[in-house]
Amino acid sequence: MLIFIASCNEKEQEEPENAVNPSPTVDQLTYVEKDGIVSVEFETVEGTIEWERGATLEGFDGEGYLIWNKEDNFTTPGIGILTYKINITSPGTYQFVWRSRISEGNSISEANDSWLRFGDAADFFGQREGSTVYPKGTGKTPNPEGNSADGWFKIYMNRVGEWFWRSNTSDNDPHDIFVTFETAGIYTMEVSGRSRFHGLDRFVLFIEGKTLSEAQNAERSEIVRP
């Protein structure tokens, strides 16, 4: 149901230029896409972060969740950045959806959003019934209604009292979120704090031809440690 709401070779032959190393060397955890699906628990991020780790709000997946408990950053993305490295083995266009929650209050338009960016993907856009929007600062237009800057989308939901799967951009004109990975490789997904008390539980990416239900029910992505 769509609900309109308001406010991720063989050696004998010449290897392709962008061939993927099956054991990539990176300086942090890498999450491996499998069969066109990426499924990640937000709390698996390691190191010192500005987000608060929690495990008291009922209904979360995995071992916990993250909550932005610092100041609101309504117009300034890039504060309190969480970084997730994603190893894409099946190039294509993926839909992105996260499971999040308004952790305090009863307003559907407060504590309901965070910032998201895929800065090294071939394309990062919002789409709805023939309408496409791009983050401000990318040189692409049109841009979403409401705040956006430096390649970041404001990603919101509007459900009180539960963890909920929804990720939209553009105020009062909800567009779903898509990312295009033209070649196999390791890409960077960034999240930063926007609205205080917005909680993040899990996110999925699923390639065209797959469904949100398939992504929700898929096993969690393999984690490769450096």
Image (cartoon, rainbow, N blue to C red):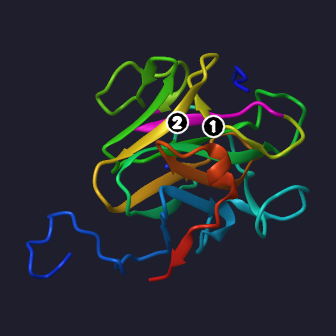
Name the residue at 52% across, 49% down. Answer: 206
Q: Which is more toward the observer, 191 or 194?
A: 191
Badge 2 amino acid: Ile
- 162 vs 190, left or right, is right
Question: Is 135 above or below relative to 24?
Answer: above
Quadrant location of residue 9? bottom left
Name the residue at 73% across, 46% down. Answer: 100
Quadrant location of residue 56? bottom right
Query: What is the magenta range?
Result: 149-159
Local secondary structure at mark 1 = loop
Marks 1 and 2, the one that precedes in the sequence: 1
- 11 vs 215, left or right, is left
Q: Which is more toward the observer, 64 or 23?
A: 23
Q: Position of residue 120 (x, y in %)?
A: 33, 51
Local secondary structure at mark 2 = strand
Viewer can see residue 150: no
- Which quadrant is home to the C terminus? bottom left
Badge 1 amino acid: Ser
**80 inside magenta stretch:** no
Name the mark on residue 167: 1
Q: Position of residue 192 (x, y in %)?
A: 57, 49
Residue that mark 2 sits on: 177
- Which quadrant is home to the N terminus? top right
Q: Position of residue 155 (x, y in %)?
A: 60, 36
- 81 vs 113, left or right, is left
- Is the residue marked by circle 1 packed among few (<14), some (14-19), or many (20+) residues within 10 Å? many
Q: Position of residue 221 (x, y in %)?
A: 57, 68
